[in-house]
């Protein structure tokens, strides 16, 4: 498929040029010079002044203007990290946290993990004494707010909560400024965080917030931080800032980007992307190409197609993937300067849209889609769907081409589609997510009136009610919707999805906590298999060596046992198509989870070969994901017990084509069908045992079904 492009009729000027600025990052300029050339540098004084005088400062600036890497350094230089204080900067994405922290450490000439550090789930590269600038995911900051042992003993009143939060923040670290970055992404944790920080700020006037965003949706943010404050009427006098919030726009300096659209809609955007890359390489002057696809599978497929290019039009291309979960060495390649005479092609997920700045990109290829979470409270299914992006995103993606000089953006959709059908902005994640984790976090912080919580955007009441219902069935909350003791508090304390945490808790009585922890560790990673396009057959054969009739969870246990028996050898992993780095990570996460389990009084026991115990533990956490095969089904269709949704076992599951009668899935992905990923067999009688108010026996009685 060879897309034909037409130029945007309006001339496609998306970004203006600021004449004076020239590009940075040739690798020649000194770090200091590079820093001074960034647009935020001109605003240094203004930013510091606003932070000094306002509780909340909102900074809007185009991607690459230096918000993330520079503002924390400005604050540090201005003394906001002196005398026991610290600067924290959150990001929605793990990969961005790692990458930005290491860049800032490099610019400051310090060792990562000392003065500059980062924390993501299960990975803490900070030093309790030395770290002054800390990057972390928004989710981890929420955890840090929660991680207070007192909370497990007392249900505290709101005013006590504030003291606990403050006390807590004091005893770990005292952030003087919290910068909530990439706020335009409106990730679930960012929104919860903004709601909480707004509350905390009222009682801690010396705490400053910076909210930074790549789009000008900032006004609603400012309105959020200004609203209802006056009604409160009991601000602490004195040391607080005089004003509430201010918006600062950093003047962008992108170059013109000429936009092209396909003449006809393309049917296969991966092939279309590949032929677009090759024709850019053929016809256009040097400059790197950034390609937006939706996920690792797409990226692998495109890389494979490029490698197979039989006309050798790929000569001189350096093709690099970029997605979360990519090993560190591969991440670094993406940021390294392009060798002379070569052209880099970076094939990326949404992560390169605004979270990371790639120097040298002149051409952007935008497939028009991204993977997005969608939750339907009626069916109670949350899935990851490849869905059209918004115009906002499309504009951001195009903007990445105008970083160093005028660029070109090739959109693999028609102009007519862009103008008439694309939605103008995205829906905040909180309005399209399952809220179980969100609700438990707020409950653990003592916020009982969740419907009345001051959200930047309110979630749907149906989704909240569904979440409360599931938490009630998990035994996490009681009839009054308060966290139960100890179960609710224990589950809140484990840094995992509440359903996984419940599985671990339940494994204590079932005598299989070691197994449950291994399963939880594996599920916390994207995949433990090493897959490359073209080696699917070998991978399937390798999987068969470990496949368990009980399903994927038990298969993971077999893999882990094999790994331990091989003395954790990398060549064993290699032979078995297992990702060695992933297994090391499993080990690392296991270690941390075992420590948490012990703290919660769970005794570490193995059930050896009693897989019934393991299956029951999974059921205890995931009962709401139970499915039954359709009677007379010829194509392996299942129905969820709860919402009667048609679902299928994913081809990557060891139970694909085995089609046992009753299963529980871990998650759903949908392409042309709704696929269950990571599936385990169960007995239907376990369901009412695990969740009596969730399942009625009639619902499960096979006679009523077949
Ligand atoms: P913003 O947050 O406004 O999008 P950043 O602070 O992330 O901007 O980036 C500012 C500049 O720092 C970029 O233009 C780029 O030149 C440089 N930069 C950021 N991260 C890296 C990195 N990992 N390697 C090399 N340069 C980087
Ligand atoms: Mg940034």
Image: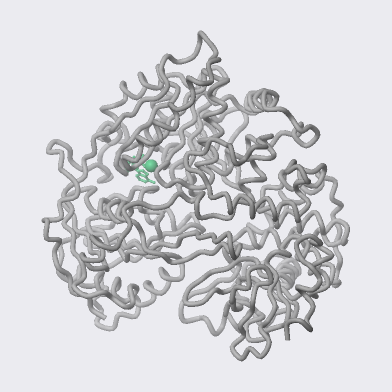
Q: Is residue 94 above or below residue 575?
A: above
Spot occupied by residue 157 in the image (x, y as percentages of width and height): 71, 27
Residue 372 or 576: which is nearer the viewer?
372
Ligand 1: image quarter: top left
Q: Is residue 210 above or below residue 281?
A: above
The image quarter containing residue 342 is bottom left
Spot occupied by residue 312 in the image (x, y as percentages of width and height): 25, 79
Residue 409 or 430: which is nearer the viewer?
430
Residue 396 or 313: which is nearer the viewer?
396
Spot occupied by residue 153 in the image (x, y as percentages of width and height): 81, 34
Seen at 15% across and 55% down, the residue is 12
The image quarter containing residue 550 is bottom right
Seen at 41% across and 29% down, the residue is 73
Q: Is residue 69 above or below residue 86?
A: below
Residue 275 or 244: which is nearer the viewer?
244
What is the residue that sits farthest to the top in this orientation?
A: 238
Q: Quadrant of the C terminus?
A: bottom right
Task: Tell how many labels.
Answer: 0
Spot occupied by residue 406 in the image (x, y as percentages of width and height): 16, 51
Residue 519 shown left or right of residue 204 in the figure = right
Residue 573 shown left or right of residue 458 in the figure = right
Seen at 42% across and 37% down, the residue is 104
Residue 641 shown left or right of residue 413 in the figure = right
Q: Quadrant of the N terminus?
A: bottom left
Q: Is residue 162 above or below residue 669?
A: above
């Amino acid at each position: 498929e060879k897309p034909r492009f037409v130029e945007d009729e309006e001339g496609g000027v998306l970004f203006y040029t600021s004449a004076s600025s020239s590009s940075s990052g040739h690798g020649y300029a000194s770090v200091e010079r590079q820093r001074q050339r960034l647009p935020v540098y001109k605003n240094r004084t203004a930013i510091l002044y606003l932070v000094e005088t306002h509780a909340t400062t909102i900074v809007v600036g185009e991607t690459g203007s230096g918000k993330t890497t520079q503002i924390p350094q400005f604050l540090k230089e201005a003394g906001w990290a002196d005398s026991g204080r610290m600067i924290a900067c959150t990001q929605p994405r793990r990969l961005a946290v790692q990458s930005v922290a290491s860049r800032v450490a490099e610019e400051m000439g310090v060792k990562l993990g000392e003065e500059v550090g980062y924390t993501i789930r299960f990975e803490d590269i900070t030093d309790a004494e030395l770290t002054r600038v800390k990057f972390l995911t928004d989710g981890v900051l929420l955890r840090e707010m929660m991680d207070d042992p007192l909370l497990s003993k007392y249900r505290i009143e709101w005013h006590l909560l504030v003291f606990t939060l403050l006390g807590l923040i004091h005893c770990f670290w005292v952030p003087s400024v919290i910068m909530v970055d990439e706020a335009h992404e409106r990730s679930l944790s960012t929104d919860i965080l903004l709601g909480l920080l707004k509350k905390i700020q009222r009682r801690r006037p010396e705490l400053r917030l910076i909210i930074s965003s790549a789009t000008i949706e900032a006004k609603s943010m400012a309105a959020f931080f200004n609203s209802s404050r006056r009604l409160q009427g009991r601000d602490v006098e004195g040391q607080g800032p005089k004003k509430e919030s201010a918006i600062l726009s950093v003047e962008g300096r992108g170059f013109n980007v000429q936009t092209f659209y396909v003449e006809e809609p393309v049917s296969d955007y991966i092939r279309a992307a590949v032929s677009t890359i090759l024709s850019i390489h053929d016809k256009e002057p040097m400059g790197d190409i950034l390609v937006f696809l939706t996920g690792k599978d797409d990226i692998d497929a495109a890389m494979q197609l490029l490698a197979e290019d039989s006309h050798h039009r790929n000569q001189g291309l350096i093709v690099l993937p970029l997605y979360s979960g990519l090993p560190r060495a591969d991440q670094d390649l993406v940021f390294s300067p392009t060798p002379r005479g070569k052209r880099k092609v970076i094939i990326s997920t949404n992560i390169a849209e605004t979270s990371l700045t790639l120097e040298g990109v002149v051409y952007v290829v935008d497939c028009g889609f991204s993977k997005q979470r969608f939750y339907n409270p009626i069916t109670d299914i949350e899935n990851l769907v490849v869905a059209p992006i918004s115009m906002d995103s499309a504009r951001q993606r195009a903007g990445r081409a105008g970083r160093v000089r005028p660029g070109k953006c090739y959109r693999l959709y028609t102009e007519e589609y862009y103008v008439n059908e694309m939605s103008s902005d995205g829906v905040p994640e909180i309005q399209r997510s399952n809220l179980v984790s969100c609700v438990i976090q707020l409950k653990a912080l003592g916020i009982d009136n969740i419907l009345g919580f001051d959200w930047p955007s309110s979630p749907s009441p149906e989704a909240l009610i569904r979440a409360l219902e599931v938490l009630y069935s998990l035994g996490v909350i009681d009839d009054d919707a308060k966290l139960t003791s100890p179960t609710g508090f224990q589950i809140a304390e484990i840094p995992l999805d509440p359903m996984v945490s419940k599985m671990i808790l339940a494994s204590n009585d079932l005598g299989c906590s070691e197994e449950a922890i291994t399963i939880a560790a594996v599920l916390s990673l994207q995949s433990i298999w090493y897959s490359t396009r073209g080696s699917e057959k070998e991978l399937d054969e390798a999987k068969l060596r470990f496949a368990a009739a009980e399903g994927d969870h038990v298969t993971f246990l077999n893999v882990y046992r094999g790994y331990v028996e091989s003395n954790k050898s990398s060549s064993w992993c290699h032979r078995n198509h297992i990702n060695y780095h992933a297994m090391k990570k499993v080990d690392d996460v296991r270690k941390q989870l075992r420590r948490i389990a012990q703290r919660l009084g769970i005794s570490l026991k193995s059930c050896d070969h009693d897989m019934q115990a393991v299956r029951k533990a999974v059921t205890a956490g995931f009962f709401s994901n139970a499915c039954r095969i359709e009677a007379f089904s010829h194509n392996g269709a299942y129905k969820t017990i709860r919402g009667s949704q048609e679902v299928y076992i994913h081809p990557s599951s060891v139970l694909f084509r085995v089609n046992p009668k009753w299963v529980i899935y871990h998650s759903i992905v949908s392409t042309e069908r709704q696929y269950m990923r990571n599936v385990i067999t169960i007995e239907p009688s376990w369901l009412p045992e695990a969740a009596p108010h969730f399942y009625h026996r009639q619902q499960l009685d096979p006679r009523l079904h077949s």
